[in-house]
Amino acid sequence: GENVEQHPSTLSVQEGDSAVIKCTYSDSASNYFPWYKQELGKRPQLIIDIRSNVGEKKDQRIAVTLNKTAKHFSLHITETQPEDSAVYFCAAKIAASKLTFGTGTRLQVTL
Amino acid sequence: NAGVTQTPKFQVLKTGQSMTLQCAQDMNHEYMSWYRQDPGMGLRLIHYSVGAGITDQGEVPNGYNVSRSTTEDFPLRLLSAAPSQTSVYFCASSYGREGYTFGSGTRLTVV
């Protein structure tokens, strides 16, 4: 089955700096890659996603890139703010089947 | 739309007891899944369903049963609770190739 690895497990950045979280997946048939943000005690919330026919997608301060050849995808957050502090999960999905998650990155934005 | 509704929000069970975690969605989503979340382990798939009458095992299915008699409902049954099943359980649903929408979770403690 699909295996998703995520790095780093923790990330601390100063407010205003950029943050990058990286994931790799194992199954080349995966074609949908969402990113979720989970605040303490709350449910995961979808923040951005990318499909395999697209190399990059941006939504305000958040961007995701995908390298299908290397089976890598990354989340980029620019101009970080304290409210960006949370746990971020990447995931990979094959067509309409199950979604496999990475183990998460705890992002801390310090003042 | 209420989205994905999970009940109960909190539950304490004694070892060996059985119970059912309820999940309902009102978005006419085809796909539904159950995940458990443990510290440092990310979100691990227990069971999933691609439509009414169709279910399949995920990564950690042992000790759990599911059924999908309607599109809306996807209950998760713990057959004989064990302390290792202490976790936060999330139900999620999606339509086609979209990302999953998560319920608010059930925090289960087995003593």
Image (cartoon, rainbow, N blue to C red):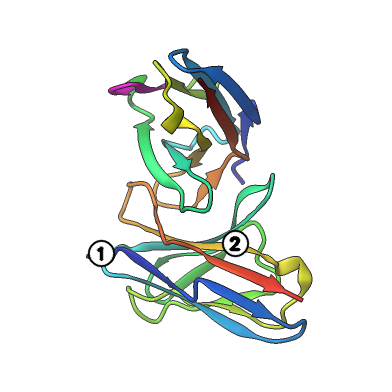
Side (left or right) of A38 relative to B18: left
Q: Position of residue A110 (x, y in %)?
A: 54, 22
> Outermost residue toward the top?
A17
- Of mark 2 and mark 1, the one earlier in the sequence is 1
Are the residues flagged by discs 2 and 1 from a single subunit?
A: yes
Count the marks.
Answer: 2
Chain under label 2? B
Tell me if residue B44 comes above or below residue A85 in the rendering: below
The secondary element bearing badge 2 is classed as strand
Q: Residue furthest left?
A: B1
Please state which amino acid type lies under the numbered disc 1: Met
Q: Secondary structure at mark 1?
A: loop
Residue identifier under label 1? B27
Give, as a single range, the part of the protein colored magenta: A57-67
Q: Which residue is mark 2?
A: B88
- Closer to us: A39 or A59: A39
